[in-house]
Image (cartoon, coloured by chain):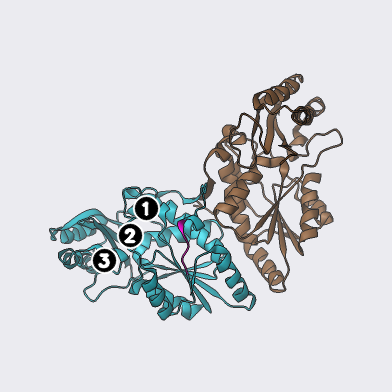
Chain colours: A brown, B cyan
Amino acid sequence: MIITTINELRTYLDSQRKSGKAIGLVPTMGFLHEGHLSLIRRAKADNDIVVVSDFVNPTQFAPNEDFESYPRNIERDEQLATGAGADVIFYPSVEEMYPAGSSTFVEVVGEITKVLCGASRPSHFRGVTTVVTMLFNIVQPNRAYFGQKDAQQAAVLIKMANDLHMNIELIVCPIVREANGLAMSSRNTYLSANERTQAVVLNQALLEAKSAFENGETDVQKLIGIISGKINEMPLADIDYVNIYEYPSLKTTKEIGAKALAAVAVKFGKTRLIDNIILKNKCN
Amino acid sequence: MIITTINELRTYLDSQRKSGKAIGLVPTMGFLHEGHLSLIRRAKADNDIVVVSDFVNPTQFAPNEDFESYPRNIERDEQLATGAGADVIFYPSVEEMYPAGSSTFVEVVGEITKVLCGASRPSHFRGVTTVVTMLFNIVQPNRAYFGQKDAQQAAVLIKMANDLHMNIELIVCPIVREANGLAMSSRNTYLSANERTQAVVLNQALLEAKSAFENGETDVQKLIGIISGKINEMPLADIDYVNIYEYPSLKTTKEIGAKALAAVAVKFGKTRLIDNIILKNKCN
């Protein structure tokens, strides 16, 4: 069932809540893939009612980014989401979410939103935290589900929810990959055949770093070197960043302690892909 | 009943909500006066359970302002609030609301937060919208009550709640005044006897403007002149601002249309007092 207005969605959810149903929310920008579907399945396992929001959020795109061309296909999304257990697809217009004159923002300030994607996309996370707050206020879910693929986004949203005392459990689910290791992304649809083949290097490079880490390498610069070196073997790869931070604080570190995030953003032609891996000390 | 922790308050309110009780929230910074009590009484009339938050919020004070010296008296507040119908006084520590590392803010951008008090207190409203969002997330009330005394704050909070699709009804209640017309304020306690006598001019000046408006004067500059002239008759009065804006948008106007806010901030010694009046065209 597709619902396009906030009022209609609230009416439906209020009646569900009154009969004691637990509500799970899976926020997406649509063009669903197996990664999204894994979140929907998990949400359905944990809750009675699953709402999938399907909204390409303009405030998280910079003017030079791909808001207009971002892939959309609501009919396909409805079929896939329903098949995975969604009860409602919330598919609002931009005007429904941001009526004329809308000017309120939720922002997590500090390193956590300035490093990695925050460096090259300075207003991105403000758009994400604002729209997710809106979705939380509209759906008032018991639990909300996010992918580890967007590791920084997940860390930022967990910090936002904690800082603002939101009464919602945030659950982060593992990255889903294609058979060759490429992380699932709606933006993979932009890739040419050649780019797609070479993009497999992201996962390979991260796995090499993980292997080196597990063999005792804890020096962040050396691990970054391993990842960058591997990615640069691919002629079509144009690195935006390769970095390693403590996780989930995203604080700078020279040596990996208990838990770190190795994250990359790499352009293949016009397509910017991200991937990451958690480096976790088994002794902790 | 005083509750100091978020967890304890949530446990109490969850059980009330499950038995179908409607919850009203009255956010205050404590040192309650008749203005606050009027909000509590209204909240009790509208709801089953009334939570009064009593928290001097550091993020809405600038470093040079009166956060440290702001008057506090929780025993007196408990007695007064309970007498007016409060079921719970939520009295958290600063660390309970803002744990170490807290760095998420809610901000309404635009003219509405830049004019009037926003001009002389540039980070004030960001602190207000952030703490009120926290309180909304903690209490999850059906309704929340604010005083028209802080007219700009009320307009900003209504805009925030609308923009972020908060599922809470915001109710703004009339200014409560002492017999001589001085608007009730916790900061009135700072005033010397002389200052208190002269502070009555705020209300008098606003009433003069209202009278002129009702006699046909719609020119904003002329009305501002009437208010400033009257206030300046008092030797201890030091005007921060006198201004008139469309209400509730707080947009600049030269001629009063359907509804405007005449607002003043005036220092008497170290004490900054605010007051306001709505100028409403009876034909609209």
Provide the chain ID for the residue under circle 3.
Answer: B
Q: Residues within 10 Å of mark 1 (few under 14, many from 20)?
A: some
Q: Amino acid at mark 3?
A: Thr
Residue B250 position by quadrant:
bottom left
- CA–CA distance in space, label 2 to label 1: 10 Å
Q: Which residue is mark 1?
A: B61
Q: Nearer the viewer, residue B214 or B111?
A: B111
Q: Residue A23: x, y in percent?
A: 71, 63
Q: The residue marked by circle 2 belongs to what chain?
A: B
Label 3: few (<14), some (14–19) or many (≥20) C-alpha neighbours in 10 Å = few
Image marks 2 and 1: residues in contact by CB distance under 8 Å? yes
Q: Magenta segment range?
A: B90-94
Circle 3 sits on which residue?
A: B189
Give the quarter of the image for residue A41: bottom right
Give the mark nearer the N terminus: 3 vs 2: 2
* Disc 2: which residue: B70
Amino acid carrying mark 2 in the image: Tyr
- In the picture, the disc for residue B78 is none
Q: Viewer-proximal residue, A239 or B103?
A: B103
Name the residue: 67% across, 57% down.
Answer: A169
Find numbered disc 1 in the image and state the secondary structure of the residue it sits on. Answer: loop
Q: Secondary structure at mark 3?
A: helix
Image quadrant of residue A127? top right
Question: Sequence-wise, which precedes: disc 1 or disc 3?
Answer: 1
Regarding residue A71, the answer to whether it shows in the image is no
Question: Where residue A27 sits: x, y (%)?
Answer: 69, 51
Horizontal and vertical percent position of residue A107:
53, 46
Left or right: residue A238 versus residue B253 is right
- Using residue B260 as the reference point, say whether residue A282 is left or right of it: right
Which callout, 2 or 1, points at the residue further toward the start of the chain?
1
The 10 Å Cα crowd at callout 2, few under 14, some 14 to 19, many 20 or more, is some
